[in-house]
Amino acid sequence: MGDAKMEDFLPPYIEGNAVVRAIGDTWSSFSERREALGLSNPGTVENIAREVQKDVFLTNYMFTGLRADWTRPLSVSPLFQYTHSFAMGSPGLPPYGFSTIFGTPKVFMQANLENDGQLSAQGNYRWTNAFITKFNVQMAPGPGQAMIQVNNDFTGKDFTASLKSINPSMLEGGLTGIFIGSYLQSITPSLALGLEAMWQRAALNAGPESMLSYCAKYKGSNWIASAQIQAQGAVSASYWRRLTEKVEAGVDLNLQFAPGLGGGGLMGNGSRKEGTATAGAKYDFRTSTFKAQLDSSGRLSCLVEKRVLPPVQITFAGEMDHFKQQAKVGLAVSIETAPEELMNAAQSTSASAPSVPF
């Protein structure tokens, strides 16, 4: 099926209108020039600095204490597995957790249940190759400990539009919650510009608030630079570079400009400036991965993941805070047990099976 034109959707009495035809011709000319640029999809505003913050940095993977994970795959197509997790000596990890994953080319679902009754679940549904709906639900014992988040991503050939809602509700007689809309558009093969708008209202007796942020992303041959300017006075910039085939490095800078006591005397209306700079590197060995990062607050962190055997992986994490004179260490063992026939099926279907919408 070819690309539909504007005239295909218009009634005959409107199609002959001179103004409508001029708008249609302008749009067709713009689409042809846009197609000739050969633009690619720039990703989402939420993951504009993914190469640095999620691939190189180890902030989301840092842990302390002892941890053990045992994963049991039950099926490859569809993907179905469950995991038992045990932890000791870590304030951020529960003593026991049970999680399960189910995935098909259209559906992805994951749920985690901790020993204290806290439940978190997330899932994705791929309506089409370009449109995916995501949800995230968290519940914990006690009042006010529930959260629901729904995200819709539309991925075009040279743009991505997203609409996110957090705790939306109409039960109080009006709309409350947090709503975030973002749009990222490729302008040239290297440059992408975008914006993000947020509207929130905690309750009907509180007034609504809105903010607008701007972002930009530039992609070179082996490097990516991005920047974001937020309405509340925050500026962030990141730079990622692939040094060799196995080595990546990244730098991230965050600046906060908030009202406070500045240089205007005891009751002055100056601004308080705070900032954090972080630099990190990632090295991929044949059977292991090493990550390290250092920030301006004096924290040095490292993470080593080593595949000892095909079903066994050992992870070591360490962090040293030079200013606070504190050190943290974590050690984890992950074991994946699967029947031999299931492993053979995974190797034979991994190349031909469509990807799961994680």
Image (cartoon, rainbow, N blue to C red):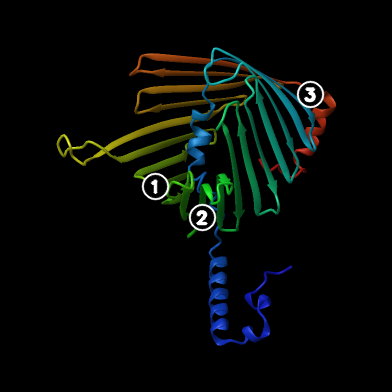
Q: Amino acid at mark 1?
A: Gln
> Whole-percent x and y of residue 349?
79, 38
Q: Secondary structure at mark 3?
A: loop
Tell me: residue 180, above or below residue 240.
below
Q: CA distance from mark 1 to mark 2?
A: 15 Å
**Residue position marked by numbered label 3 in the rendering:** 338
- Disc nearer the start of the sequence (1/2): 2
Q: Confirm whether residue 11 shows in the render.
A: yes
Q: CA distance from mark 3 to mark 1?
A: 47 Å
- Disc nearer the start of the sequence (3/1): 1
Q: Amino acid at mark 3?
A: Ala
> Whole-percent x and y of residue 99?
69, 27
**Residue plotted at (43% across, 46% down):** 206
Choose between 220 and 157: the one closer to the eye: 157
Neighbours of disc 1 within 10 Å: few (<14), some (14-19), many (20+):
some
| Image marks 3 and 1: residues in contact by CB distance under 8 Å | no
**Residue position marked by numbered label 2 in the rendering:** 183
Q: Secondary structure at mark 2?
A: strand
**Residue plotted at (39% across, 23% down):** 299
Residue at the extreme left: 265
**Residue position marked by numbered label 1 in the rendering:** 230
